[in-house]
Amino acid sequence: MICAVCGNDYDKPLEISYLGGTYAFDSFECAIHALAPVCGHCGCRVIGHGIEAGDAVYCCVHCAETAGVRGVADRT
């Protein structure tokens, strides 16, 4: 099966169904590159829970606060 990101023909692909589509990848790296949201402040891929505020996703509290989001905390 051909990876949707890099085009590698791989015999043990990851098949992921997400938001109505099904995709094949040769690695988690390619799946993250294609499907993980991008932090609204620093631009890194958010592969954990992240923080959602409005239409944006942030990788951490620092990035959310820097972008102007209030009322978020790492620990409560």
Image (cartoon, rainbow, N blue to C red):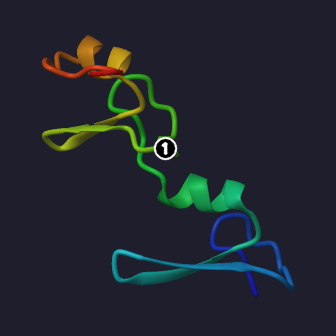
**Which residue occupies 73% across, 64% down?**
6
Which x, y percent locates residue 74? 35, 21
Tell whether 10 sits left or right of 48. Answer: right
Quarter where residue 23 is shown: bottom right
Instruction: Give the class, few, some or many, for how many residues have Cα within 10 Å of label 1's Cα (few <14, many ≥20).
Output: few
Q: Which amino acid does label 1 sit on?
A: Gly
**Which residue occupies 41% across, 44% down?**
49
Total labels drawn: 1
**Which residue occupies 76% across, 87% down?**
1
* Above-or-below relation of 23 to 30: below
Tell whether 49 sits left or right of 16. Answer: left
Please give the residue where the numbered disc 1 appears in the rendered image: 48
| Helix, strand or loop for disc 1 | loop
Which x, y percent locates residue 51? 30, 36
**Which residue occupies 69% across, 60% down?**
28
* Above-or-below relation of 15 to 36: below
**Rendered-image quadrant of the C terminus:** top left
Which x, y percent locates residue 30? 67, 59
Quarter where residue 75 is shown: top left
